[in-house]
Image (cartoon, helix red, strand yellow):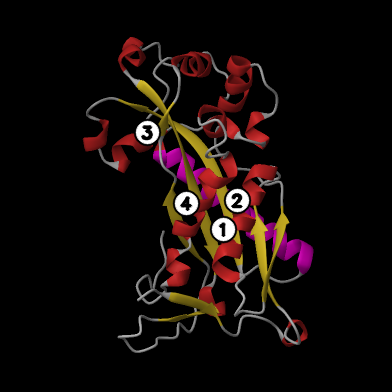
């Protein structure tokens, strides 16, 4: 049997009469990322049997990291910073907190045959070897990936458990917590890798190699490489749903993620 996640008492009395409003803050102005956030949350929340509307506000916030992050540690930190920044910006603009705030950060990682056996802690300090004058990059492949961060207090949410178990209601976090997930990694063509090694950001490198404009606001490099089968929005969308697991099953993640 499938899990049914539902929102039960998440809205103030003035919002209650007809439609429940899920307040969402997104730490980006990038149209592709905003679409990903809207799609992920609407898949989860907006169903025929629920009178729920997802309302997204976007904010231009800092990632607090390099423009082109490398490795899991830096990229995940950027996503978390964006989520927290969006949360604070929403509070300042609206005088109340969002139900969830979202940060998304794309990053790169160098991979060799033994990379899979290395831990996330090992790769957290990974940098572009070309920056340090290290020629080892010739034997490595450059992979694209991304981290998603969901930030907020889960007092708004309750969960119906599997039918074979007792229904459990989650009564709330004392402070905001994180949900995190990493999108699938995929290899980049050598021409793009070479441009990145010379200091170019991935989006600019993609535009240059394929002679296009503003790819990161539309298809993204993943969409260009897959002929649109997986565009940037869809690439982020699935990972965002995975990052929401602590909201869908707070009974299994009582402290959220750090």
Question: What residue is drawn where x is 72% and y is 79%?
Answer: 19
Q: Secondary structure at mark 2?
A: helix
- Disc 3 is placed on an element classified as loop
Is residue 105 visible from the viewing direction of this image?
yes
The residue shown at (25%, 35%) is 116
The rendered magenta stretch, by its main secondary structure, is classed as helix
Dot 1: within a 10 Å radius of its alpha carbon, few (fewer than 14), some, or many (20 or more) residues?
A: many
Q: Which residue is mark 4?
A: 239
Height in image: 241 above or below 49? above
Marks 2 & 1, CB-CB < 8 Å contact: yes
Contact between labelled residues 3 and 4, with CB atoms less than 8 Å apart:
no
In the depicted structure, whether residue 135 falls above or below residue 55: above
Q: Residues within 10 Å of mark 2 (few under 14, many from 20)?
A: many
Which comes sooner in the sequence, label 4 or label 3?
Answer: 3
**Residue of label 2:** 36
In reply to whether residue 87 is colored magenta, the answer given is yes
Q: CA–CA distance between discs 2 and 3?
A: 28 Å
Q: First in sequence, mark 2 or 4: give its number.
A: 2
Nearer the observer: mark 2 or 3; the answer is: 2
Name which quarter of the figure residue 248 lies in: bottom left
Q: What residue is shown with label 1? A: 40
How far separated are the C-alphas under marks 1 and 3? 30 Å
Expressed as whole percent of the image width and height from the top left, the position of residue 35 reads: 65, 50
State the mark number for residue 125: 3
- Front position in the image: 140 or 129: 140
Image location of residue 179, percent across then percent down: 46, 60
Q: CA distance from mark 1 to mark 4?
A: 9 Å
Q: CA distance from mark 2 to mark 1?
A: 6 Å
């Amino acid at each position: 049997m499938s899990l049914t996640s539902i929102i039960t008492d998440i809205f103030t009395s003035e919002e209650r009469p007809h439609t429940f409003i899920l307040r969402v803050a997104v730490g980006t102005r990038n149209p592709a990322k905003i679409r990903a956030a809207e799609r992920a949350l609407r898949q989860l929340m907006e169903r025929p049997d629920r009178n729920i509307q997802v309302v997204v506000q976007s904010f231009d916030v800092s990632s607090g990291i390099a423009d082109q992050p490398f490795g899991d540690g830096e990229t995940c930190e950027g996503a978390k910073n964006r989520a927290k920044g969006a949360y604070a910006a929403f509070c300042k603009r609206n005088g109340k907190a969002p139900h969830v705030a979202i940060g998304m950060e794309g990053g790169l990682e160098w991979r060799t045959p033994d990379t899979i056996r290395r831990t996330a802690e090992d790769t957290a300090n990974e940098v572009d070897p070309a920056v340090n004058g290290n020629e080892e990059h010739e034997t490595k492949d450059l992979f694209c990936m991304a981290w998603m961060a969901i930030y907020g207090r889960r007092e708004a949410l309750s969960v119906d458990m599997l039918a074979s178990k007792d229904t459990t209601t989650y009564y709330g976090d004392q402070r905001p917590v994180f949900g995190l997930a990493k999108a699938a990694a995929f290899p980049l063509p050598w021409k793009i890798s070479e441009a990145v090694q010379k200091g170019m950001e991935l989006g600019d490198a993609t535009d240059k190699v394929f002679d296009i404009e503003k790819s990161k606001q539309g298809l993204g490099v993943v969409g260009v490489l897959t002929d649109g089968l997986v565009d940037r929005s869809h690439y982020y969308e699935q990972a965002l749903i995975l990052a929401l697991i602590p909201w869908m099953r707070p009974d299994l993640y009582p402290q959220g993620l750090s």
